[in-house]
Amino acid sequence: MKQDVFLSVCKATCAAIFLPILLSGCGSGDSQKNTAAATSPPPPEVDVITVTRRSAVLTQDLPGRLQAYRTAQVRARVEGVVEKRKFTEGSNVKEGDSLYQIFSRNYQTAHDASKADVAVARQTLARYKYLLNAKAVSKQDYELAEAKLKQVEAAFSKAREDLDNTRVPAPISGRIGRSQITEGALVGRNEATLLATIEQVHPLYANFTQSGADTLRLQKAIKTGELTRNEQAKVELVLEDGSIYPQSGKFLFSDLAVDPSTNSVSLRAEFPNPKQELLPGMFVRIRFPEANVDNVVRIPQRALLADAQGQFVMIVDPQNKVTVQRVKTGSMASGDFIITEGLKGGEQLIVNGLQKARPGSVVKPIPLNQTANANTPVAIAHAKK
């Protein structure tokens, strides 16, 4: 009897001691789970676009150099000592502006003498005409006086031109470069001394070449119906830093023959340059339209990745999981890649936040605003290698 009572007391005591501990342990586990769930980060956000197919304008990027629209060398047309330079190097000048002053006293004297000779010859001819009517002189004497007048008029014209050339007028309007001579220099002796060079830089020419193989390929594709000819005449200028010149140009001409030494065709375009931001001799790339093509897929350049196995993109599946999709690229589309294999259309392609997207992880896709791109025509650029 006493033993049973003792056992009952022990059981009650143990229950009183261990039950709070067990309950405390269970409560602590649930709390840890709730805390972990509350502190776990949400899925990372990534910007995605929906891959679509659309028509495109085939273009080609070709290297070239800019050339001044017109170039004129300023040369001394008369002999003499340069007294003054009247322009600022690197400034704009207008056609007819006086650029230099050459010592002109001798030319002024010759001009005045020739002018007086013309006046005398005209008076003589008028007198001979009166005498001819009165038959006081022969017709031969009158014709000689007439020839003399023409002779002195020609000499006067030359003297006037020489006097004008002592002020060295600008032959064209444009930007003048560095002066090749200084005050006190003797110019024009036995040669037309180069004084400076003027270049008209608005507009500018862009000279470039296209390989004969590319020309033939394009002609075949158009002939077979794979491509359709593009009649757009506007071209774009890609600067050395990769930016696009804000003003479009126009295609001028293409040579009718292939250069046998380079197996290429010479082409030329013209670009406006009102602010004179472009300079002759600059290296550029000319992007011009070639043909149209339908049903192509393009992706932004930043969305394309590469590893040892090749090129790939990251897409988000219907369960918001990131998957790797291997692709093959073809041409360029104004900075975007054209996909020839791997994408069919409708996929959600990650374009921003690739560093947060790992294969198999869950992400939160955010549609990228493509309103601006929706109205922009696609242009496929074939980079010149």
Image: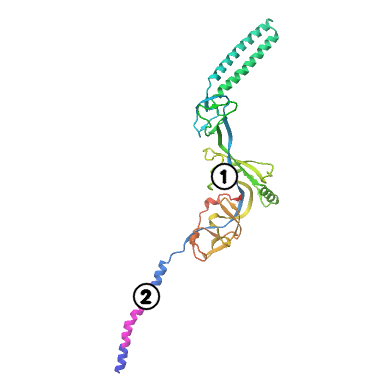
Q: Relative to 155, say whether 9 is above or below.
A: below
Q: Amino acid at mark 1?
A: Val
In this view, the residue farthest toward the bottom is: 1
Q: Position of residue 112 (x, y in %)?
A: 56, 16
Q: Which residue lies at the image location 56% right of the left edge and 35% below the top edge?
A: 200
* Numbered badge on residue 79: none
Q: Position of residue 28 (x, y in %)?
A: 37, 74
Residue 140, above or below 332: above
Question: What is the magenta segment's predominant secondary structure?
Answer: helix
Q: Nearer the viewer, mark 2 or mark 1?
A: 1
Give the residue displayed 60% in from the left and 19% down from the top: 157
How crowded pointer 2 is (Cα within 10 Å; few <14, some 14-19, many 20+) is rated as: few
In this view, 43 is above or below 259:
below
Residue topped by disc 1: 284
Q: Residue furthest left?
A: 2
Residue at figure coordinates x 67%, y 12% from the top left: 144
Residue 171 visible (yes or no)? no
x and y percentages locating residue 306 in the rendered image? 56, 59
Rendered-image quadrant of the N terminus: bottom left
Q: Give the spatial CA distance, label 2 vs label 1.
A: 72 Å
Q: Quadrant of residue 272?
A: top right
Residue 327 place in picture, x, y as percent: 59, 60
Label 2 sits on a secondary structure element that is helix
Res. 120 in view: yes
Front in this rendered view, residue 111 or 229: 111
| Residue type, label 2 | Gly
Residue 275 magenta-drawn?
no
Would you say 135 lies left or right of 356 here?
right
Frontmost residue, 283 versus 218 = 283
Report which residue position mark 2 lands on.
27
**Residue that appears at 52% across and 52% down:** 371
Q: Which span of residues is magenta-colored?
A: 10-31
